[in-house]
Image (tube, coloured by chain):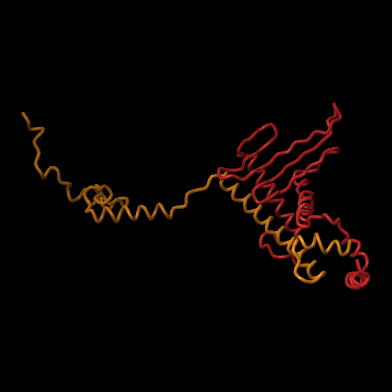
Amino acid sequence: MHDRLKFTNKDLMVPPQAEEILKDGDGLDFHNQYKSPGLSTPEEGATRRREADQRMLHQEIPKSPVEIGREQIVLVGSNLEAMRVDKIQGVLKQEEALYGGSLTEGDITKDAYELIG
Amino acid sequence: MSRLFKKALQLLVGEPSVKALKMPKSRPFKKLTERELLQLESEIGAKIFGDVAPGHRREFFCLDAKTWIWYEEWKDKKTGKITSTTTRYEVHDKGILKVQEGARYSFVEGAELDNLVLATRTYYEQVARQVYGRDPHTGFPLTA
């Protein structure tokens, strides 16, 4: 009456031939592929988590078009500002060479131009 | 100006330069220089978007590292009045905020953002070379 439900441990075992096919066929490793994480030791689990964390850390998260655009505009603006400062300082140096001494912007307004004005 | 100083200056730089250096006494040196540079930059910026229509005036320039200005001015054909519009593009953490008159604010995205990025890059390429005489990629002075 219960024949259909009766089975032995032998019935549950994967036949050796089938195991070989699963292991070698298509590069699949049946046992490792489907090994339950719960079956690993705590050390193995910790190692796996560390490795996963490292992968996440080193994974480059793709930037959105807005972020890319923003970065490019900031870069251009910063470069332009640096060029302006450089140009202005270059003019100050030229005027220092012309008038001698060490001039500040205030000096140029108050003294240098009054001298020649 | 003392005669001696004037003569020395003439000997050093010549007469034309003396005239060129006669600036208003109240001139705030740095501000005027920055303004002059911005005007030079804007002359280039105005042409990036193509020819300016007759009767129109356009300014496009980088005010500072995080602000760009687009100013457009024209004469209204019906009323004859001068009309203008100013658009300010501000760099924020979330993106580029477009600020217009009438408290209109919106973050720039899509094709408009692409165009703005392209415009700023073109501006930089041309301004670096033509105003500052520098290679836009390396920042080094251009060799003649």
- Left or right? Give the position of A1 relative to A20: left
The picture places residue B70, in percent across and down from the top left corner, at 73, 42
- Left or right? Give the position of A57 relative to B9: left
Give the residue at the far left of this rendering: A1
B141 and B65: which is toward the camera: B65
| Residue B130 in which image quadrant | bottom right
- Left or right? Give the position of A11 relative to A32: left
Point 47% across, 52% down: residue: A60
The picture places residue A1, in percent across and down from the top left corner, at 5, 28
Point 28% across, 49% down: residue: A33
User: Quick one: which chain is orange?
Assistant: A
- Left or right? Give the position of B104 relative to B56: left
Total labels drawn = 0
Q: Is A104 rendered above or below residue B80?
A: below
For the C terminus of chain B, which image quadrant? bottom right
| Residue A108 in which image quadrant | bottom right
Q: Is B115 rendered above or below residue A104?
A: above
A38 and A116: which is toward the camera: A116
Point 66% across, 57% down: residue: A79
Give the residue at the far top of this rendering: B78
A38 and B97: which is toward the camera: B97
The picture places residue A77, in percent across and down from the top left corner, at 66, 52
User: Quick one: which chain is red?
Assistant: B
For the N terminus of chain B, which image quadrant? bottom right
